[in-house]
Image: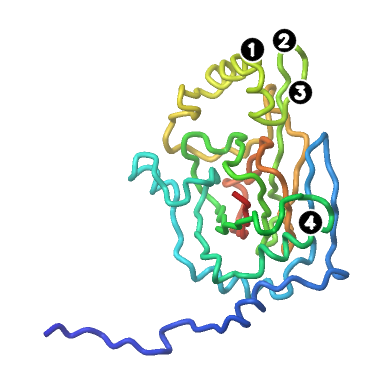
Amino acid sequence: MMNLPDIKLSDFSAYTYNELLELCEFNPLNDLEILNTECEGTRYLRIGNVFKNPLELREFVMKFPTEDKNRSLLEGEGESFGKSSKSPGMQQPLERQLIPAIGNQLYFIARRLNFIKFNKEHVTWKYFTNIYYPGMTAFNRNYLPHVDPFSLAANSFLTDSPTTATAFFRVRDRVNGKYYYGANEIYSNPDTRKRHIENLKERYGYCDKGFAPTGLEPWVKFDGDDYYEKYLSLPADFNSCYMYWGKKWHSVNFDAEKETKIRYSIVSVIE
């Protein structure tokens, strides 16, 4: 008979449903610092002082299993259980039943401000964390601008990382002189699509599958170049949340060489 160690109730983390609601609770509407604005047609919503108990919430979500995305991608030949997100670093998938109040509160604020028009019954939220850390590496140049596979994202910061940001980019077509802010726009015309793909291949080594097959390499803090121009930067301030549309080109502005602290956030997305 195997000599197994005993399991005690104290080994488990137990919560009531009301306690889970309290962990995710927003501050009262009048105490929130709300900015509903746009920059060059890119709408975003900033909510400052968002969570009532941000440190308790952080302690709770840190207990979830964490995936090292780069290792998963290397070992699984491109597979990751967080593959719906193109974010680098590490991630934790969060079960929606364990953080039940976040999406409802985000929806209430966004709908009140006419930021979204979806009916509530048509909205399904998905949650995960992003963990960026000093010395992290890139995989297939995933520091470059990308668009999301989901429609809307809300990034809620549980650390104070104001020297890092979510940066947004545009490209200027060399023939028609027009600025484009996302793949849907530039791919809507076969000529601009062709020129954009040529630029991705020539400048960044992209292959026909739509990524640069460079494997692991040093992380680059990408601030733009003579093709991708940065026009908006949203700083990662503690207990703030930024909501934006995933169809716009964006990337994380994080200097893995100079940053000394982890940047940690809960990402809530509508698929």
Figure check: 230 above or below 264? above
Going by the numbered disc 3, the residue's amino acid type is Tyr
Separation of marks 2 and 1 at Cα, in angstroms = 10 Å
Which of pointers 3 and 4 indicates the residue nearer the eye?
4
Q: Nearer the viewer, residue 185 or 256?
A: 185
Point out residue 92 in the picture as x, y percentages from the top left corner: 50, 59
Q: Which residue is mark 1?
A: 191
Mark number for residue 179?
Answer: 3
Q: Quadrant of the N terminus?
A: bottom left
Q: Which residue is mark 4?
A: 111
- Residue placed at 51% from the left, 65% from the top? 95
In contact (CB < 8 Å): disc 3 and disc 2: no
> Which type of secondary structure does the marked residue at label 4 adopt?
helix
Point out residue 8 in the picture as x, y percentages from the top left corner: 36, 89
Going by the numbered disc 1, the residue's amino acid type is Asp
Point out residue 55 in the picture as x, y percentages from the top left corner: 65, 73
Asked if residue 182 lies left or right of residue 70, the reply is right
